[in-house]
Image (cartoon, rainbow, N blue to C red):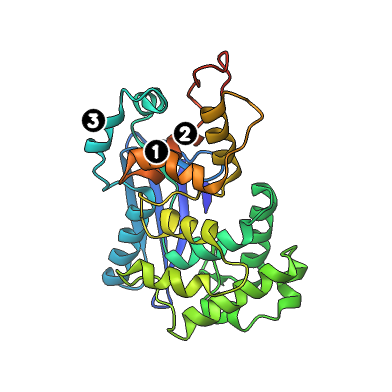
Amino acid sequence: MRRSGGVLERLLHVEDEAVVVRVAEADGQASRRGSGRLGITRSVLLGAWGPSAGVCEVALTRMRFALGVDDDLSEFHRRFRDDPLIGRAIRSAPGLRPARRPVPFEALAWAICEQLIEYSRAVAIQRRIVARLGRRAPEGLLRDLPRPDTLAATAPALLESFDLSARRALALRRAAREISRGRIDLDHPDHERAWRRLREIPEIGSWTVESLALHGQGRLDQVPAGDLSLLKFVGRALSGDPRARADELQVRRFFARYAPWGGLAATYAMRGLLTLPGLGGTRL
C-alpha cells in the first residue's frame, strides 16, 4: 500500500494479472487506517487499472471487502450502541471495521509472521518478504505479496534471514505449499474445513486461524482470543485489576455475549476509547 497525493494505492493480482487499485475518501481525503489491525471505513471512491474490465471488477470487489464498505452492521449498532463496555466506542466511531486483507492468503501469511512478536517487528518482516519475493507491477514501484507457490518453494533459511523464526518459517512454507497444491482452499465457503487442515500444521494454532477468519474471510463472529490486547482488556474487565490478564477461554466467553459479532465487538474493545468500571477512569 502506498499513499500518493491523498490517495491510497494498492497492487493486487487476479489470476496473475496485475491490477492497481486506488482509494480515496469521497470528500477527497485519503481513506484512514488506524494503527495495528484496526481500520475505519468511510464513504470512499475506488478505481482500478488493469488489463481488462473483468480483472478490474474482481480487484474492486476484493478492495470493497477489505474496506468493509458493503457491510450492513445496523443490527449490531442497534443492539450494542448503549452497551456499558463498547457502546461509547460504537457511538464515537460507527464506521469502525476490523482491518481486512483483500485475499485470505495474505491474512494467513501475515498472521503467521505476527505470532508472539511486536506488531512493528512483524510489519518489518512482511516488508522484507514483499521486497525480496513479492510480485511487481509492470510499471511503477508497487508490489504485491508473493504467490503461495513462491513461498512454498522458498528456502526456510531465506525466510529466517528476514527475521522470521525457524519454526514460523517452516509453518509459512508448509501452509503455502498446502494451499498451492489445492489441499487447503481458503476461499471455500466451508471455512471450518480449511481451519481444521491449517491446525494440523505445527505452529499454526487458534490465534492464527482466528486472525485469518476475522481479517481475511470476513468472519465477524471470530475473536482472535490470544491477542495480548484482548487478554489484558478482558482481565481488567473481569477483575478490576489493571495488571490482570485473562486466558483465551475467558476471552471467548466474554465476547460470546456479542454473538454473532464477537470479532467486531473485540475490535471496538481494542480501539481504546472506553473506560472500564472500577478502574478509576483507566483507558485501554
Amino acid carrying label 1: it is Ala
- Residue 40 shows in the view: no
* Rendered image quadrant of residue 281: top right
Tell me, yes or no, whether the two marked residues, 2 and 1, touch with CB atoms within 8 Å.
yes
Q: Which circle's residue, 2 or 3, is located before the other in the chain?
A: 3
Residue 252 in the image: x percent, y percent? 45, 46
Q: Which circle's residue, 3 or 1, is located before the other in the chain?
A: 3
Q: Is residue 86 above or below residue 149?
A: above
Residue at the disc numbered 2? 269
* Residue 237 marker: none
Q: Mark 3 to mark 1: distance in Å?
A: 13 Å
Where's the C terminus, which quadrant? top right
* Rendered image quadrant of residue 151: bottom right
Q: Is residue 62 above or below residue 247?
A: below
Residue at the disc numbered 1? 265
- Residue 95 shows in the view: yes
Residue at the disc numbered 3? 78
Residue at position x 59%, y 78% in the image = 174
Residue 275 in the image: x percent, y percent? 50, 20
Give the crowd class for mark 1: few <14, some 14-19, many >=20 residues within 10 Å.
Answer: many
Task: Answer with left or right where residue 207 lies relative to residue 187.
Answer: right
SS under mark 2:
helix
Q: Mark 2 to mark 1: distance in Å?
A: 6 Å
Amino acid carrying label 2: it is Ala
Q: Mark 2 to mark 3: distance in Å?
A: 17 Å
Task: Answer with left or right where residue 23 lies relative to residue 235.
Answer: left
Tell me, yes or no, whether the two marked residues, 2 and 3, touch with CB atoms within 8 Å.
no
